[in-house]
């Protein structure tokens, strides 16, 4: 029998089909992440949803206040799966929230109670597509007014909170699902789901190519792994704060003040080239220019953005009648993340700063 052809066809050590277990691994399992692995995210999800929803407040000065007091029902399940180094998520939840609130700026100081039913939180829907039914226990005219305010104002903000759950399920919980292979850095592959992928809950599959190796640079152009350019957009804001420019400048640069309004761990090295991190690492970046109390320039990114891609944030603090007008221009925002980023600035920066430090009311 002539075995020469057979011998020549045999794979050498370290070569051949990557599905064969010929690679040395410390864990000795799921080589090249080929096999389907599943991780139960149900209890983690219940804890995270309670953390994000219970205690959530809306306080519209002169209009109404709203607070989620409890979550008596949270039925469903969630799993994170790895197949061929791709992350796939399945989740479906039906949630009941108890709320309490009252109208402001009127003689009636009655506190009303009600419920919000979250109907279709699943991988098939983005955060903005999640339906919620609002009810109130009283049948008075004031109760009806309050219910309509909750429906119009509070529900979109609750959708933003649920978008944070979707985001953190895909980033925090999925860590270590994809095992590092030989010569791999261990970075997770992009997440996928069955959702239509609107901005509030999309995890982009683009990757950024950064020239050079001397640390992060402001992006002059981005591309995915196929060489296609990453589509980006510009955001602009003008927001009034009733405080002095130097006070508002400190809020964006001092560690303890950042931690106070984001209500999570924050770090800040407020010097040119210094790093910052907010919301336990969800937001990271670098200070590029600090001219207190007039101007601040930062490189800013969310951790679900393409690897290495930073936007540029230019903040100008202009004195105005009774306070400060903040003019913020953010360029190089991934197109798929524009609405999520816009809502984050409005809800988790501007509104949170006003509520935390009292900068939403005029100075006298």
Image (spheres, rainbow, N blue to C red):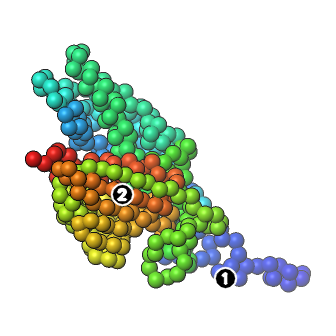
Q: Is residue 233 above or below residue 45?
A: below
SS class, disc 1? loop
Query: At x 33% / y 73%, what residue is drawn?
Result: 289
Q: Is residue 8 above or below residue 286?
A: below
Looking at the rendering, which quadrant does residue 46 occupy?
top left
Left-right relation of 29 to 78: right
In the visual, does 152 lie left or right of 202? left
User: Does residue 281 lie above or below 271 as drawn?
Assistant: above
Q: What residue is at 17 percent from the left and 50 percent from the top?
A: 322
- Disc 1 target residue: 13
Q: Residue furthest front?
A: 321
Label 1 vs label 2: CA separation? 57 Å
Q: For the residue carrying disc 2, how many other residues have a C-alpha within 10 Å: few (<14), some (14-19), or many (20+)?
A: many
Q: Quadrant of the N terminus?
A: bottom right
Residue 328: image tag: 2
Above/below status of 177 relative to 51: below
Residue 332 is situated, as x and y percent measured from the top left of the image, at 48, 61
Name the residue at 68% across, 79% down: 15
Where residue 189 appears, as percent x and y from the top left, is: 53, 63
């Amino acid at each position: 029998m002539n075995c020469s052809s057979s011998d020549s066809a045999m794979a050498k050590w370290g070569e051949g089909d990557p599905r064969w277990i010929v690679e040395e691994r410390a864990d000795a399992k799921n080589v090249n992440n080929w096999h389907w692995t599943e991780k139960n995210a149900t209890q983690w999800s219940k804890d995270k949803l309670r953390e994000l929803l219970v205690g959530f407040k809306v306080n519209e000065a002169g209009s109404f206040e709203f607070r989620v007091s409890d979550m008596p029902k949270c039925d469903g399940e969630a799993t994170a799966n790895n197949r061929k180094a791709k992350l796939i998520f399945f989740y479906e939840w039906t949630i009941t929230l108890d709320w309490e609130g009252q109208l402001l700026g009127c003689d009636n100081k009655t506190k009303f109670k009600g419920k919000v039913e979250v109907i279709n939180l699943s991988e098939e829907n983005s955060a903005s597509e999640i339906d919620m039914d609002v009810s109130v226990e009283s049948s008075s005219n004031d109760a009806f007014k309050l219910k309509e305010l909750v429906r119009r104002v509070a529900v979109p903000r609750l959708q933003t909170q649920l978008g944070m759950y979707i985001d953190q399920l895909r980033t925090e919980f999925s860590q270590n699902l994809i095992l590092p292979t030989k010569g791999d850095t261990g970075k997770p592959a992009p997440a996928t789901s069955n959702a239509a992928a609107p901005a509030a809950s999309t995890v982009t599959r683009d990757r950024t190519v950064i020239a050079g190796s001397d640390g992060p640079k402001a992006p002059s152009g981005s591309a995915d792994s196929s060489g296609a350019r990453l589509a980006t957009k510009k955001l602009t804001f003008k927001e009034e704060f009733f405080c002095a420019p130097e006070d508002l400048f400190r809020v964006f640069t001092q560690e303890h003040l950042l931690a106070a309004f984001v209500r999570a761990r924050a770090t800040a090295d407020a010097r040119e080239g210094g790093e910052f991190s907010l919301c336990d690492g969800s937001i990271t970046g670098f200070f590029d220019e600090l001219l207190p109390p007039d101007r601040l320039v930062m490189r800013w990114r969310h951790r679900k953005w393409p690897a290495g891609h930073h936007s540029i944030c230019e903040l100008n603090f202009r004195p105005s009648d009774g306070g400060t007008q903040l003019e913020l221009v953010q360029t190089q925002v991934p197109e798929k993340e524009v609405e999520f980023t816009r809502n984050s600035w409005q809800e988790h920066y501007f509104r949170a700063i006003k509520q935390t430090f009292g900068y939403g009311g005029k100075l006298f």
